[in-house]
Image (cartoon, grey):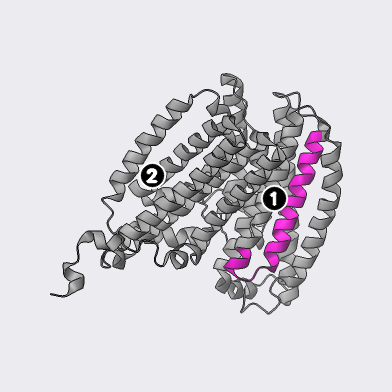
Amino acid sequence: MSIEQIRPPLATWCKPYQGMLRLWLYDLGCVSFLGTSLLGLVLGLALLISGKTDVVSLVFAMSTVSAAAGIAWQLNRLVATETSQLIPGYQAKVLQQALTIAIAVIGFQVLACVIFSAYEVIAQLWLAVAVGLGFVWLCLWRSHYFHLSFALFIAVPFLDELSSRLSLWASLIIVAMLFYRVVGLCRQLSWNSDARVVYLNAVQMGWMWLPSIKGVAWVAKFERLFHPMNFFIGPVLTMMMLALPVIAVGLMLFSWLFDIDLPIVFLIAQFSVISCAVIHWSRIQRWRATETLFLLPSYSGLKGMKDAFFRSQYRFIAAMVLIVTCIGLLNASFKPELSLLFLLHLGLSTFWGCAIMLGIGSACRNSHQATAAMLVVFAHSIIVSMSFAALRDHDSITPWLLLDIPLTLLGVLALRWGQGQLWKFGVTAP
């Protein structure tokens, strides 16, 4: 018997961080979440230094749930890999690395809040930890729940309202209970045949899943409006666009019945830019299908296909701006403070956010570039959230409208530039 075979289990923990960079930073799905989390930490610290604590809670919560999504992604990948159980101590190392990342993110945020005396942010921070732990627990319990990762980011704006109704001790008790459940499931990790399917589908669909309804004639006609842009992502895009107004109206009624202030318009505007990121992410993941699209009897060569693709993108941007504006006008009947000037700013911000995202996304040729392009989503979220904070504080909206003008021009230029970059090297390359 060799020395390695008789070595006690404790020895597997001697180098728990060996290979950590390769495991966590070379996996595109994981690093996209962890990169967002790191950006949130840096931006949150900058906001604390500048004294803008009203936005810090949102940014730190976004960082926390992003880190939770990255950890859930690695744990799902762990149970999807059959060989992970054959390597002694491998699972233990991954779990300890995941715990280290979680402690580092939470510890940094709590320490920053204490140093800058932003104690009111800590209550919402622990709620974000509870949401993240709940998501990790769901993914460990059933792997397919990872498809609902987008719901994490939708839940973030609601935490501020929820934190005012829950005490800090109640949040800590929820965190402790969820942590106990997560630890219990981590001790029972075993290979899961469904986890690999979830892994592949999540990579190709940009971590987004919605149910599909087929055979409805008017849905098929609606889908044709956005062809060939939706060729790679499939019916998910149509279902998302149809679900947004329904969800918004439901949240408005919920907010009105229970007298809860929900940032509904902010969520819809944010989700519109996220959908633009997912469109080109799916195009890159399924780039081999470009030849199939090119062979369809619908275009006069490659230039005709590129022109049709961008015309469908223009229609998509117009549709998203229309959806956000209509939802904003409807929400204004419940919230009189939503003035026409602010709704104009919201429509313009949706336009330039979608235009910049689609323009840069068209120029992306690999997954790393597409991941970096998603920073546009984060920048759009920060600008819009700060304008909402100005509206809440009864500040002037004019500076935000003036900011929209150059950003709108930038969006138009990004679209024109992206049109020249898309399929620049033919249909046999992304």
Q: In terms of depth relative to the viewer, which is nearer, 267 or 109?
A: 109
Quadrant housing the C terminus: bottom right
Q: Is residue 142 magenta?
A: no
| Few, some or many residues within 10 Å of mark 2 (<14, 14–19, 20+) | some
CA distance for labels 1 and 2: 29 Å
Q: In terms of depth relative to the viewer, which is nearer, 261 or 11?
A: 11
* Residue 339 left/right relative to 233: right
Asked if residue 139 is positioned above or below residue 78 in the image, the reply reads: above
Res. 183 in view: yes
Amino acid beneath label 1: Ala
Which circle, 1 or 2, is nearer the viewer?
1
Disc sitting over residue 20 in the figure: none
Could you tell me which secondary element the residue under label 2 belongs to? helix
From the top left corner, tell me how far across and down residue 73 is, in percent: 44, 55
Q: What's drawn in magenta, residue-wise? A: 342-370
From the top left corner, tell me how far across and down residue 397 is, in percent: 83, 35
Q: What predominant SS class does the magenta segment belong to? A: helix
Q: Is residue 360 magenta?
A: yes
Disc sitting over residue 379 in the figure: 1
Q: Which residue is mark 2?
A: 138
